[in-house]
Image: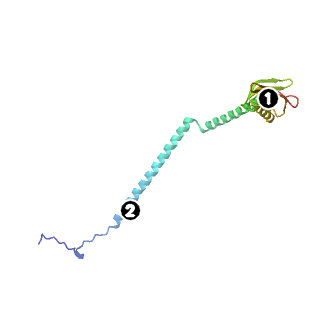
């Protein structure tokens, strides 16, 4: 009978019970887990500190390469000063520009593309501007006269005469303009 296999469950009295772990063994496991956790935290802090130090070194090298912050502020102040001087010089040039140039600029804006100037005559004493040109339609010449009267530079001027004549389906015109109040100062 020794070769028989017992298929029945062992009796309760025959079961082997495990001994409970000793408190010193539990304490050792807890201490070991605490030490491993502490090493992990310390290692993470050390790594982040090293990363921060390397970034600080990179920033310091970059600032050293570009110059100190004070030098950057000085160059920025110099650029702002230079810009202000340039703007002031432009304003001086615009103020020194003769009024005749302003009138020519205004004429460039006032004359439409349907009107062609063939002659522009400017006399200083007495000041008078004579425009001669051609247009396919007399309404374009009338629009030119309205534009001149509404313009900023010619607002104080008077259109003395307008002469129109038809030549080969074109209207030839001559407009004479003088200032209303005794001349335009140069």
Closest to the observer: 30 or 184?
A: 184
Image quadrant where residue 161 sits:
top right
Q: Position of residue 173 (x, y in %)?
A: 79, 27
Q: Tell me the residue at 46%/51% (across/down).
A: 45
In the figure, 22 relative to 141: above or below?
A: below
| Neighbourhood count class around disc 1 (C-alpha, 10 Å): few under 14, some 14–19, many 20 upward | some
Dividing the picture into quadrants, the one containing residue 8 is: bottom left
Q: Along the line of sight, which residue is nearer the eye, 123 or 143? A: 143
Residue at the outermost right position: 182
Residue 25 in view in this figure: yes
Comes first in the chain, label 2 or label 1: 2
Circle 1 SS class: helix
The answer to whether residue 156 is left or right of residue 17 is right
Q: Please rate how many residues cluster around mark 2, counting C-alpha atoms within 10 Å: few if below 14, some from 14 to 19, many from 20.
A: few
79 and 121: which one is in front?
121
Answer above or below: position of 178 versus 58. Answer: above
**Residue at 37% across, 64% down:** 27
State which mark lies toward you, 2 or 1: 1
Spot occupied by residue 129 in the image (x, y as percentages of width and height): 81, 26
Cα gap from disc 2 to disc 1, whole angstroms:
96 Å
The residue that label 1 is drawn on is 99
Give the total number of marks visible in the rendering: 2
Q: Which element type, helix, strand or loop, lies under badge 2? A: helix
Residue extending furthest toward the left: 1
Is 166 or 12 nearer to us in this picture? Answer: 166
Residue at position x 40%, y 59% in the image: 34
Which residue bears the numbered disc 2?
A: 30
Residue 184 visible to an observer of this rendering: no
Q: Position of residue 39 (x, y in %)?
A: 41, 54
State the residue at coordinates (47%, 49%). 48
What residue occupies the far front of the structure in this picture? 168
Kindly indicate the quadrant of the structure image that contains residue 15: bottom left
């Amino acid at each position: 009978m020794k070769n028989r296999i017992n298929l029945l469950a062992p009796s309760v009295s025959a079961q082997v019970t495990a001994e409970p772990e000793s408190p010193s063994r539990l304490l050792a496991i807890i201490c070991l887990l605490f030490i491993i956790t502490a090493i992990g935290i310390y290692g993470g802090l050390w790594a982040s500190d090293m990363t921060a130090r390397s970034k600080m070194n990179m920033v310091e090298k970059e600032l050293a390469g570009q110059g100190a912050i004070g030098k950057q502020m000085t160059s920025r102040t110099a650029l702002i000063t230079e810009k202000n001087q340039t703007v002031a010089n432009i304003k001086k040039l615009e103020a020194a520009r003769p009024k005749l140039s302003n009138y020519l600029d205004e004429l460039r804006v006032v004359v439409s593309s349907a009107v062609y100037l063939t002659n522009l005559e400017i006399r200083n004493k007495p000041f008078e501007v004579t425009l001669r040109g051609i247009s396919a339609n007399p309404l374009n010449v009338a629009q030119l006269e309205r534009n001149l009267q509404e313009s900023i530079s010619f607002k104080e001027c008077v259109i003395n005469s307008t002469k129109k004549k038809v030549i080969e389906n074109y209207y030839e015109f001559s407009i004479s303009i003088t200032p209303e109040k005794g001349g335009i100062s140069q």
